[in-house]
Amino acid sequence: MGLEAQKAALESLAPELLERKKKARNYSLPDLPNAVDGKVVTRFPPEPNGYLHIGHAKAAIIDCEYARKYNGKFILRYDDTNPEKESKEFYEAQASDLRWLGVEWDEEYCTSSRLMRHYELAEQLISQGDAYVCSCSGDTIKGNRFDRRECACRSLPPADQMKRWKEMFLAPAGTAILRLKGDIKSNNTAMRDPTLARIIDAEHPVQGKKYRVWPTYDFVGAVEDSDSGVTHPFRTKEYELRDEVYFYVLDRLGLRKPTLMEFSRLAIEGMPVSKRLIKPLIDEGRVTGYDDPRLPTLRGLRRRGLQPEAIRQFVLTQGTSKVESTVTFDQVEAINRKLLDPKAKRFFFVPSPVRLIVHGAPNSKVTLRFHPTEELGNREIETSHVFFIPGADASALAAGTLFRLKDLYNVRVDRIEEDGTIYGSHAGEGIAPDTLKLQWVTEDHVALTVSKPGLLFVDGKYNENSAETVTGYAEKAVLCVHDEVVQFERFGFCRIESCGRQIKAFYTHK
RNA sequence: GCUCCCGUAGUGUAGUCCGGCCAAUCAUUCCGGCCUUUCGAGCCGGUGACUCGGGUUCGAAUCCCGACGGGAGCACCA
């Protein structure tokens, strides 16, 4: 029986079998292991040392989303245990960026507020013989780690270690560190007696000069997750080698062990996320700051016109896999466009304007809707016989061509002058099929420059053309728009940043 | 170099833990078509993938071994 015959036979016997069922994509995150509804606790632990970017957003959104999914609790924890790197401004900046993102936390605290607890646990480790004070030089420590060799400090008895620990609080910075007695022979370099605490003299943005001995990430990351009741801490893949340390520390301390999980770092093509790459761009004036719309910082994305919800949906489509991938920005744009489409007001913006004189044009006042289908209001425009149309479209016109001024009437081209000016004649109101429909402005317009954020890096090199601008005329009505994303018809979505005579527009995407 | 992680269409992603319902999901890109007073959105359709080689099994994207490829870590940063 041939395929067609089989189909026909099936059609008569059981037609329902011919319909291919479509499985609906489930956008929610996969189930968590060891999760109990109402008992899940997650946390987002940024270090207040810079502005949050899309990578942080991924972590924060996933953490928050899981807490909601299981009716649990979500904690914002500032991991501020290195006073040399952190500064006051970032605590609030990070919180406000998270609020903009729509991430809401149930609790918030600073790791630096718990140093006494860390000291207490450090002393427990010391007295148990699980930690020691090492006074070797940095180079010696490094060499010994490489050679898998224990140093003399390690074998001193706990009582001596405790004495050395007390002395650390008065010792000059750099002269001693507290190390975990791990496994110096381990293949995992992270286990070769990692540092638990060190001396730092810098003033802390919150604690001031109260402390000099600061615990490290390996120590407090594990302790804080456990102490604060976090059940499902997430971190990015580069910490995977430290998992063993994490659990070992908790094990020696007799503390509860959370279900630790990892996901890959989020990378977007041409958009650097690291301060190492961004800082020089700012210093050299190649970007305007951390809120430059070409940057994937939350501030940059916001300025560009990205909706927080788009970032959330995008992050959720990425999920929690460990596969490292580089996404192109159009994935984010597509989501953003769908969100923006029903709520962005439509305006006319004419890039590279060319003058159009219409013979027989009526002087009239037209009312144009801000949106073709949604009730977003409207604006009025008075028209006479002078218009401006886009240069790119004008260059395709020739004498005799019929086109339409969108939402107005048809025009037939009579002639085109040397200077580019187009002379045409009014050619009826009815919509003619298959004609160009052009956006237009009248003589009563505003000059506008649109910044088009491009990729900052192409093939690993700074892209000199990342800050393209398009100049043109916009209809007057844009003057009443403040900090809003609009759609310039046939041009693209743009965020209008300021009002008055100084309008800035950023091209969000097509 | 050592250790660890990861390899599903152009790009992402679901499925991999607990092998069969996978003739492999969804999105995006691209290409058609429809609709439309926008080159947008929407609707319909199409192209397109389990890195390779062995093994286990009645049956492998899924389990095992190896190769190859990519990434990460090897701090008194987080």
Image (tube, coloured by chain):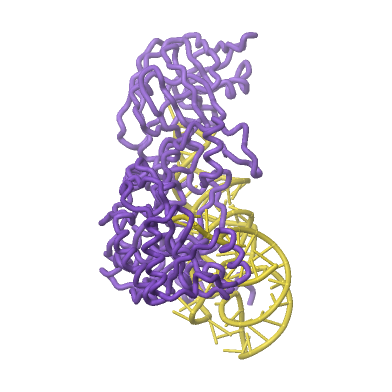
Q: Position of residue B39 (x, y in %)?
A: 53, 36
Q: Is residue A159 visible?
A: yes
Residue, x 39% and y 28% (percent of image)?
A497
Q: In the figure, A356 relative to A311: above or below? A: above
Residue B70 shown left or right of residue A167 in the figure: right
Q: Colour of chain B?
A: yellow
Whole-percent x and y of residue A387? 48, 14
Given residues A392 and A398, the one toward you in this image is A392
- Rendering quarter of residue B22: bottom right
Residue A233 screen position, x and y as percent: 38, 65
Residue A313 is at least partly visible in this image: no
How far from the left and from the top, in percent, is residue A71?
27, 64
The residue positioned 57% from the left and 38% from the top of the image is A456
Name which residue lies at 42% across and 69% down.
A260
Q: Which chain is purple?
A: A
* Number of numbered discs visible in the structure rendering: 0
Quadrant occupied by the N terminus of chain A? bottom right
Left or right: A476 with respect to B25? left
Q: Is residue A348 left or right of residue A151?
A: left
Residue at point 33% right, 74% down?
Answer: A256
Q: Examine the rendered structure and indicate whether residue B33 appears above or below residue A407.
A: below
